[in-house]
Amino acid sequence: MEKIICGIQQMGIGVPNVTEIWSWYRKYFGVDIKVFEDAAEAPLMIDYTGNKVQKRTATLALSMNGGGGFEIWQYTSRNTEKANFDIQLGDYGLYSCKIKSRNVTETYAFYKENGLKLLSEIEKTPEGKKHFFVEDPNGNIFEIVEGLSWFGDTNHPAKTGGVAGSVIGVSSIENSLKIYQNLLEYSEIVYDKIDEYPVYSDLNGGKQKVRRVLLRHQQARKGPFAQLLGATEIELIQALDRTDCRKIFENRFWGDWGFIHLCFDIQGMEALKIEAEKLGFPFTVDSGDTFDMGEAGGRFSYVEDPDGTLIEFVETHKVPILKKLGWYINLKKRDPKKHLPKWMLKTMGLNRVK
């Protein structure tokens, strides 16, 4: 089977408080569909968890407006550790999670009215689109951007959908393009600009010259969940005035506080593995066959970008569509390029948590 990138499945977020923060995400982002909740050990991630098997709980949540979901992840065998330094714009790793909006101005007004910590005014990107930054109660930074595609309309007051991409700090744009343009197929360069930007001025380390490159995929994504996950973008940020950039997860474990991985829903894991090795990004983790996630199952793997940022791939084999009736779908028996019927995906909305 050929490699098929179906879309961003989820942003992994390490938190100290799954229940509380997911309630906040439901209220302010509308990410309220529970796909699975699983408490278990994570033996396959031992290379990223201090050479010791750690226990954790994970909840995967989506928005029926479309976009990627959140894998909200919390250690149960140790404390969730924060970075012991102030993370700055340009540090290496998943700096910010992009959330799509139907109306950026209305989203901003809703957040302001509700007292959220806004980190910028509404500004225009080099492409001319509105965006702004907001912080969650755990200090994670989200960028609200104009949505490129939509699956449904839940009439959520924030006018938001799910994950629309990520802002990623890198040491070299050129080196990073090899994985984001080639392996992940974000082949279109929307802009490549060097400047200081007002939208960053209130961010830690934001008053500096940076190179920012916005990448999009030119072709609509294929695969079972592509319609739900939608169009996404990756923005690479390289600090040009700083010589003290650090890895955001320096001296910490995967699963600790912050954005722990960016996960892509894919089909054709073996073909992906071969291509990743040829490009110089071999799998560092590979579950092989079907890995059971309680209510869901599939094969997952990880690669590192040139700065060690973790990219996860999940080839979904089994997924709950309507858990109350015990309705699961086996994707191994379907054409990997075809979308699941929209009505079938919409039934996942019955798994909403209020």
Image (cartoon, rainbow, N blue to C red):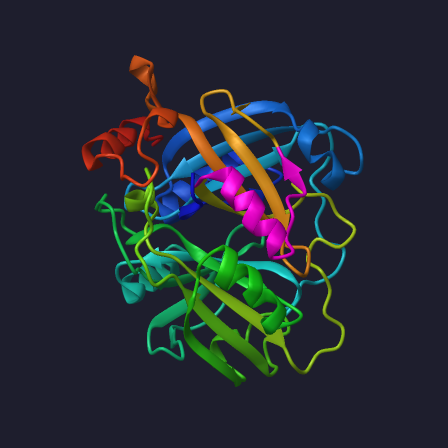
At horizontal 45% and vertical 27% (from top left) the residue drawn is: 36
In this image, 335 relative to 139: left or right? left
How many numbered circles are shown?
0
Viewer-proximal residue, 316 or 22? 316
At horizontal 68% and vertical 60% (from top left) the residue drawn is: 307
Residue 6 position, x and y percent, is: 38, 46
Viewer-proximal residue, 261 or 257? 261
In this image, 8 relative to 80: left or right? left
Residue 276 position, x and y percent, is: 58, 50
Where are the magenta residues, as a range? 267-286
- Say whether residue 273 is magenta: yes
Q: Quadrant of the N terminus?
A: top left
Above or below, comparing residue 228 to residue 241 in the picture: above
In this image, 141 relative to 116: left or right? right
Above or below, comparing residue 92 to residue 23 in the picture: below
Q: Quadrant of the C terminus?
A: top left
At horizontal 29% and vertical 30% (from top left) the residue drawn is: 348
Determine which quarter of the picture holds residue 44: top right
Above or below, comparing residue 6 to residue 188 in the picture: above
- Say whether residue 38 is magenta: no
At horizontal 43% and vertical 65% (from top left) the residue drawn is: 187
Note whether residue 285 is visible: yes
Residue 280 position, x and y percent, is: 65, 56
Determine which quarter of the picture holds residue 52: top right
In this image, 349 relative to 114: left or right? left
- Identity of the residue furthest to the left in this view: 343
Viewer-proximal residue, 14 or 189? 189
Residue 134 position, x and y percent, is: 47, 61
Note whether residue 89 is visible: no
Determine which quarter of the picture holds residue 112: bottom left
